[in-house]
Amino acid sequence: MISRMISRMQPLATSPGRHSTLSTISVIFLSLLVCNHQICSGYEAERGVQLRGGSTNNNSAYLRFVILHLPPVLIVTRNSSGHITNLGGIAMSVLEWLSHTMDFRYEIIPDNIYSVENNAAGKGLMSYILEGRADVILGGIVITASRFQKLNFPYPFVIGQFGLVIPYPSSEVDIMAVWKPFQGQIWIFLAVSMGMTILCLYGISHCIKDYLTNKTTKTKLTNGKLFEDIGRAFQYVFGVILSQGLLAQGGTSRDQKLTIRFLAGAWCTACFVLVTAYSSVLISFVTSPNYKPMIQSLYDMPKNPKIKITVNRGWSPDLLFTNAEDGIFKYLGDQLRNEPGLRCSETSQCMDRVRKGSSAYVQEYRTIRNYVGEDLKNTGRCDFTIAKQLFFSFGAGLAISKQADVEYYNRGMLKAHEAGFVDLWFARNSVDASRCLNPIRDIASEKQRVTLGGLSGAFLALGFGYGLSVLSFVGEFIFRRR
């Protein structure tokens, strides 16, 4: 019915100026009609498990489709005997859209095959096209050089990148948080400045003492309360930087000269800036949860040999790595060749291997995002997350024979992208996994409270100081007893 409406609209576009306007109107009108028939929401339950469909026009083209199960692109649900009980996903929405816009009838071949190429388990989906048993492979078929030699690929409805599923990181105790507010160079310069300040105070005090001493009578004109004792200088410098206010106890007096006052004032000013900066930055380290993913990207894997890649046998990541001749892809391909067990026949096996904390699973980003969301929905907790950096952009969609007309399918796919239906189908068929994808921002209530784990570094330093104090006390006690 929709195709007949479009055919009636086309004769009206007699002039170039009216053609674009009427074409746009017809696409919008068609989109509204299609949405009313529930195509926007995917392959609905009212169609059940019907494996045939399309227009009622007997003169329509008849196409045979073979399917690749890959949620959320195509979701195939089977019962215990292997019969299909439900079909869903973005691919079914694409199929219904193309059937109505391009006016063809279709049949879905309900075979249970999970690979495109032939492998040790038997023939793949590609053989259906090459042997003439099917016309189209329905699913997110990634375009590769080896596949393009045998098949044609219309405009893809999946344009994305590969990602890595990794175990969800746990919050670790950061005992080094007390040192992190300052970079290493600052600590080095601070230690050097403290040593120089102590030596300057001690040296200037001795010079003043010698100058104020009566050379003839060898009697002192001062009461000896300057920094002529290295211990007093040390006590003063550390007291100021620790904000203990030991200025009156550090050996100073009203007899101090202007030189010492300038030096002490400069040190107090520097300590004020350093302590204020340190205190303000330290709070951000001790209040934030310390989540450290085991890897940030695919290129971190050579740095951690304990982590192995895991892929679906015969799927695009497997072919990408095993056919690589150099770089990080060849490194991962060597892992797969040396350990064939890293290839899994079912996605659940790959995810279980990741759950054990020894592997990272590679697949298209929106696909693994859906896997993470499904696991969160089933378990109520985050066992998985996705590495921050994605890699290898690609397109995926339908696959047809070399003799088929690609433009016939391109027109329908471009209309779906132009109307924004593809993004809508992805949004409606995906499970929300945002809670597991931002582990650093998780649990806002814990960010507002200082935890013992965050202050463990400060308590460790305090315990070290207690130990030194006890040893000093024991030493002084023994020395006085003698």
Image (cartoon, rainbow, N blue to C red):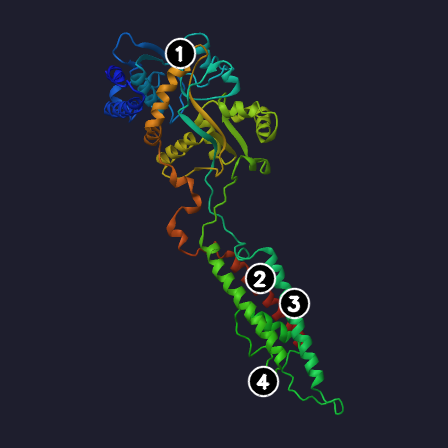
Marks 4 and 1, Cα distance to the nearest angstrom? 100 Å
Marks 4 and 3, Cα distance to the nearest angstrom? 25 Å
* Mark 3 or 2, nearer chain start: 3
Marks 3 and 2, Cα distance to the nearest angstrom? 21 Å
Image quadrant assignment for residue 24 = top left
Mark 2 burial class by Cα count in 10 Å: few <14, some 14-19, many 20+: few
Q: Is residue 123 above or below residue 21?
A: above
Mark 3 burial class by Cα count in 10 Å: few <14, some 14-19, many 20+: few
Q: Quadrant of the C terminus?
A: bottom right
Q: Is residue 38 above or below residue 360?
A: above
* Mark 4 or 3, nearer chain start: 3
Name the residue beneath numbered marker 1. Answer: 135
* Mark 4 or 1, nearer chain start: 1
Q: Nearer the viewer, mark 3 or mark 1?
A: 1
Q: Nearer the viewer, mark 4 or mark 1?
A: 1
Are the residues tagged 4 and 3 within 8 Å (C-beta)?
A: no
Which mark is drawn over residue 464? 2
* Mark 1 or 2, nearer chain start: 1
Marks 3 and 1, Cα distance to the nearest angstrom? 82 Å
Percent across and percent down for residue 286 are 47, 55
Name the residue beneath numbered marker 3. Answer: 195
